[in-house]
Image (spheres, rainbow, N blue to C red):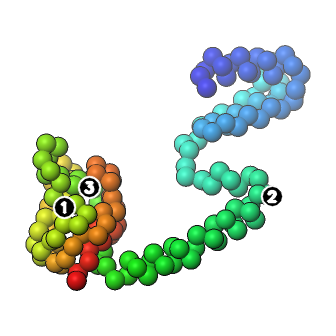
């Protein structure tokens, strides 16, 4: 919403005779109050918010139990998957930065799913503050799963790879 739209909204509310109008959108909240403020210009409060990761399904109260039941059904599959993954070694990020699977855009990835690796082999590169850090394997085995997409940000201790040590 731009300034002209807000100004026209203020004029409309002043002419309509409404005492208070609240407008909430995804990224902005506007409250326009008219009344005995001693001025012919209505009082306007504009609050702009940066959208955060909030549960959007919090408003409808009735569908919530159904959603809970649906979420409960896949839980046993997730538990089984976690048990299967427990036999693998997780290679985690030692630093915060941007994860790259290739040494450069025109080169092949360091490893693929199914690649056999040895201790000391480079698995990926993490860029932090314009420095490219080789992430070496601390175990020997076979790459079972790559848990991060290429060119995506990673946090400290975030799982990157699952390795089957057998």
Question: Eyeballing the image, is 77 above or below 147?
Answer: below
Mark toward the viewer: 2 or 1: 1
Q: How crowded is mark 1: few (under 14 residues within 10 Å), some or many (20 or more)?
A: some
In terms of image quadrants, where is residue 119? bottom left
CA–CA distance in space, label 3 to label 2 = 42 Å
Q: Which mark is residue 99?
A: 3
Mark toward the viewer: 3 or 1: 1
Residue at left 84%, top 16%?
15
**Residue that badge 2 annotates:** 62
Q: Which mark is residue 111?
A: 1
User: In terms of sequence position, does the residue under pointer 2 or pointer 1 come before the other?
Assistant: 2
Q: How crowded is mark 3: few (under 14 residues within 10 Å), some or many (20 or more)?
A: many
Q: Position of residue 116 (x, y in %)?
A: 16, 70
Locate the N terminus and report the quarter of the image it occupies: top right
Q: Where is residue 27 in the image (x, y as percent from the top left)?
A: 60, 38
43 vs 99, nearest the viewer: 99
In terms of image quadrants, where is residue 157? bottom left
110 vs 5, nearest the viewer: 110
CA–CA distance in space, label 2 to label 1 = 48 Å
**In the structure shown, which secondary structural element does the residue marked by tag 2 occupy?**
loop
**In the structure shown, which secondary structural element does the residue marked by tag 1 occupy?**
loop
In terms of image quadrants, where is residue 9? top right
């Amino acid at each position: 919403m731009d300034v002209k739209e807000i100004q026209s909204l203020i004029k409309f509310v002043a002419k309509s005779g409404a005492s208070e109008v609240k407008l909430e959108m995804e990224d902005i909240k506007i409250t326009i109050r008219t009344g005995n403020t001693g001025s012919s210009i209505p009082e306007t409060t504009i609050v702009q918010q940066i959208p955060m990761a909030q549960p959007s399904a919090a408003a409808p109260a009735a569908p919530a139990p159904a959603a809970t039941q649906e979420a409960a059904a896949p839980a046993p599959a997730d538990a089984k998957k976690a048990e299967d993954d427990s036999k693998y070694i997780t290679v985690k990020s030692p630093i915060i930065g941007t994860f790259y699977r290739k040494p450069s855009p025109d080169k092949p990835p360091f490893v693929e799913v199914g690649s056999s690796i040895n201790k000391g082999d480079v698995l990926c590169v993490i860029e932090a503050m314009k420095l490219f850090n080789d992430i070496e394997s601390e175990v020997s085995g076979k790459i079972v799963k790559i848990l991060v997409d290429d060119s995506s940000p990673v946090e400290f201790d975030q799982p990157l790879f699952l390795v089957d040590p057998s």
